[in-house]
Image (cartoon, rainbow, N blue to C red):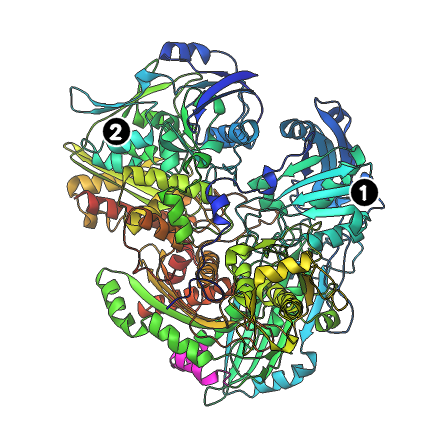
Amino acid sequence: MYNFEFEKPSTIADAVAALGSEDAQALGGGQTLIPTMKQRLASPAKLVSLSGIAEMKGVCVEDDGSLAIGGGTTHATVASEAAGTFPALANLASHIGDPAVRNRGTIGGSLANNDPSACYPAAALGSGATIRTNAREIAADDYFQGMFTTALDEGEIITSVRFPVPQAANYQKFLQPASRFALVGVFVARFADGVRVAVTGASEDGVFRWSEAEQALSGSFSADAVSGLSVDPGGMIGDLHGTKEYRAHLVGVMTRRAVAAAG
Amino acid sequence: MTQVSMTVNGKAVSGDVEVRTLLSSFLRDHLSLTGTHVGCDTGQCGACMVHVDGDAVKSCNMLALEADGAQVDTIEGQAAEDGTLNTIQQAFQDHHGLQCGFCTPGMVMSAAALLKDNPQPTEAEIRAYLEGNICRCTGYHNIVKAIMAASGQDVGAIAAE
Amino acid sequence: MPKDSGIGASSKRREDVRFLTGTGNYTDDINVHGQAYVHFLRSDVAHGRINGINTDAAAAMPGVVRIFTGADFEGVGGLPCGWQVTDKHGEPMQEPPHPVLAQGKVRHVGDPIAAVVADSAEQARDAAEAIEVDIEDLPAVIDMKAALADGATKVHDDLTSNLCYDWGFVEENKAAVDEAIANAAHVTTLELVNNRLVANPMEPRVAVADYNRANDESTLYTTSQNPHVIRLLMGAFVLGIPEHKLRVVAPDVGGGFGTKIFHYAEEAFCTFAARAINRPVKWTSSRSEAFISDAQGRDHVTRIELALDADNNFTAIRTETHANMGAYLSTFASSVPTWLHGTLMAGNYKTPLIYVNVKAVFTNTVPVDAYRGAGRPEATFQLERVIDKAARELGVDPIALRRQNFITEFPYATPVAVEYDTGNYVATMDKLEEVADLSGFAARRAASEAKGMLRGLGVNCYIEACGIAPSNLVGQLGARAGLYDVATVRVNATGSISVMTGAHSHGQGHETAFPQVVADMLGIDESMVNIVHGDTAKIPHGMGTYGSRSLAVCGSAMVRATEKIINKAKKIAAHLMEASEADIELKDGQFSVAGTDKSVAWGDVCLAAYVPHNYPLEDIEPGLEETAFYDPANFTYPAGAYACEVEVDPETGKVSIERFSAADDFGNIINPMIVDGQVHGGLAQGIGQALLEHAIYDESGQLLNASYMDYAMPRADDVPFYEVDHSCQTPCTHNPLGVKGCGEAGAIGSPPAVVNAVIDALQSGGKNVTHIDMPVSPSRVWAAMNG
């Protein structure tokens, strides 16, 4: 990789300051950024490691019952510490990447990168989460803006993510066999006021809500309720792992399975 | 150059490195701990697996500076001082869990991390846990068997030696 | 009772201790004091004309020692091809030059254009990015059939076309085959693709070259399956360095699977550059580089026709195959689709008439060469798939159809020029039915269906030709090398033994299994024997490890050398005991005089050989060291029967391997544990080919899946525990150990079993699917089900 400067601040404020310089980039767990830099596909002038910021780590239940997860919390920590409160989220975290990736990769890093095949975007959008940064709070519906694109400004850091805890939820992932990212992943969450369905891996526009399924499931939360629905293959990703039509088909299958598993 | 210090296999070490130095490079090139192997550049193969503060980590996907102050354990630190293989290493030899040996350090470190958290994993749990460790030689049969044996499970009923 | 030592014992591998403790010595672990680092600037286009290269800016960058381009290699030899194939008209194949660094044109993505030597690897890479290359894009030739069309762009301007050769085998049989097919009661036709694979040994290739100007000697440390072959090819054909000035060392090698047989440009470059700059140089491939520079495997497109008579006896087979050579002829590329493929088209069956046509084609892709099985998987796949298809068309049981057509008498001369010395295909199929519990399949299918899954059973046979030989025959067929092997047994004064072998383990456990043989012959403990391999300075000669040949060929040389040792030792023992040499017997490490209680121990005889105070100096020389070259009389013919059971998810098309069973006949077995491991690994690679792996080029010649992010390697959860059995043993009749070779069987025999099983599953679900090309991915299965 190209060389760069390196800072490892211990507070959010220091990190924000460090990210103020030109071409500075935040380093979360590095499980995507480091390989990208090794390939010389990214060349930040400075890396600001967020791994030394204690206030960005951990999982806690807030007063309103929602779950707050620090942006620097690893997938492994979410898998273990969210298991009691939000088992569907913990289960999703426990299947991201592989064990070593889960020990380093962070929720903030994943959401900031917004890989179109990543799992966390489906959980955040499907749960109606709130992305909290050093500067503001952003609703998930406003946060995801297409492949690798988010509402974050330059130098803005995801400090935590607030997840409303649904009455029932489930995530179903169909693996891309090489990277083990989602070829298609569907997160379904049932709340008192309705159902949310978020799909990752499938669309050329990145993670999206399948509103037609949401409406059907809000009426009747059963696999049968969505059995006749399908998404338009037109906007789906078509590549060597699956055609547009196949991905569109999988969206339906994974949605039904997620609903059935959520109970 | 920046100084980095850590404890590797129980010994305090330090060195002057370029900021971009990966933990795998620090181990191999600066400390001559060449048991940690590099088999890919995208983080899938797991040949570079070490433990950082007790957690399995891919050392080619972590800056050496990120391990500053950490306890790092590598394959070289797994056997006893007198060279006696540890339980996992011995099980790999007993059950022919390696052939060319290149992925083996990563497999052993991964198995150690698994058994620490899950002392009696099922076959399915072992196979799932090894998602980040690629072996091209063994077809995984004897790796899974060796890990089951290392966890004290009877593997006599599993086909073949 | 299993044996606990010697031939037939599952001795634990002694090499494991260093591998398990991180103390192996792989090529990248080698650093020579003062070494510089190489980075290759590789083409990012598949086909282009180089109009200019400007290295001025790059040469001025920090740490740069020197930059080399194709111009530095004018007058230097190209990388040679080791096998000349003669086409169906009797003409030699078209053989283009293969320069170390591109000259005039680039012909595939990854073709090296320039090489930077610098003080650090990162500096070399930095400077490589500063080299300005003016390349004029040319149309890329990717599809093989398009490459042969009139007016197609030529990969090599100086050749008449992109056709390397058009091979007919056996050409004299063609008319009879055509007639038999025209008159057959039934003909089953299948068109298929044998998917291109990337070998992907976990250790990427590395080359470290050193040069000693004082004595003009070069040393190359390289990731090779055959260091002597590299020394010969690089020394004699590329760089013009005689053997005594060139040492090639292959230390611990982290897997090869064929792709580390070949002589590569990077090895020649490093050796050349170390001499040019009088400094050691090192190159370590990244995995990304490996995807575009390691020779790849398979890539055949085939049409096969199987003719049967009214009683379902096979009467003829006719095939037409397009075989992709890639942009250049890699070391053994030309032999793979011909002599390693056409000669196996009889399989396990007594088909009287066979004709094989192979068109080898140049394209703007990475060169293709031998990969585990090499030609034999391609032959087995098409044959075992077309038989399965025929059974379905005829409404007969696929196992019964195979059994009906089995070769049952040996030796058997096939219509494709080889003679199987021995085998028992009925016995291996019987054994398979037992170990695979085929009688329980119906119940397992019912259980799968109860949970909404389709279950299929696929069965097939395979035969392979291993230990490729004899040299005088392969020489007639175009091989430019001998295919013998060599072993030296050096008995030391205290009775310990070093065996220098031309075979070179890259995971096969030679350091354990070979001593089992020598120790067994001498009746001494295995621990007294060690193996020295992988270094041309330490070993007399050798042809290396590939084609499941090590034990059958080099092991036989080792037996012959050990026999010489025993003969000489008996002479010494006879002298020591004042007895007749004819009366000396060797048992359990003791030489005794028949019919007496006189004996001397192995160690006493060895000591006498090196301290010859009481010694028959007038009759024999002191010392105890013998060398044997062994050139086999024939190939060996391992064979077996495999069964795969899959579940197919009818909603997603995902295939999971639920059971895999293998019954192999490898002849005699030295170390059953190692043999099982070889089969396991081969099965995973075959399953990988069948379900997961496929190197895909787009029309511009970019490899779309050039990393593990997109090239799907089999993981632990993609495969089950395997049931393997090798109790059916018909020993090879022509080598002293009766062994056949086991390294490639799994990869050869498993792909058709998987695909046959998937087709069976889909048909059980009422889907009229007769074929799906590999890899049988969920997307393809779903498309086939809904097509």
The residue positioned farthest toward the left in the image shown:
A192
Query: In the rendered view of the protein, which quadrant contains the C terminus of chain C?
Result: bottom left
**The magenta stretch spans residue C62:** no
Residue on which disc 1 sits: C73
Q: What SS does tag 1 mark?
A: helix
- Secondary structure mainly formed by the magenta segment: helix
Q: Answer left or right for C165 relative to C765.
A: right
Q: Is residue C687 above or below residue A239?
A: below
Relative to B13, C477 lies left or right: right
Q: Amino acid at mark 2?
A: Gly
Q: Which portion, as a residue range, is magenta?
A: C389-408
- Work out which quarter of the rendered image holds the N terminus of chain C and state it: bottom left
Tag 1: residue type? Phe
Front in this rendered view, residue C554 or B102: C554
Question: Label 2 neighbourhood size at 10 Å, few (<14), some (14-19), many (20+)?
Answer: many
Chain under numbered label 1: C
Which is closer to the viewer, label 1 or label 2? 1
**Residue designated by label 2:** A128
Report if residue C269 is visible in the image: no
Q: Which residue: 43% across, 9% down? A: A17
State the image coordinates of residue A176 (x, y, percent, origin top left): 41, 46
> In this rendering, is residue C561 above or below C231?
below
Q: Secondary structure at mark 2?
A: loop
Residue A104, given in percent of the width and then of the height, sits at: 38, 29
Q: Nearer the viewer, residue C661 or A19?
A: C661
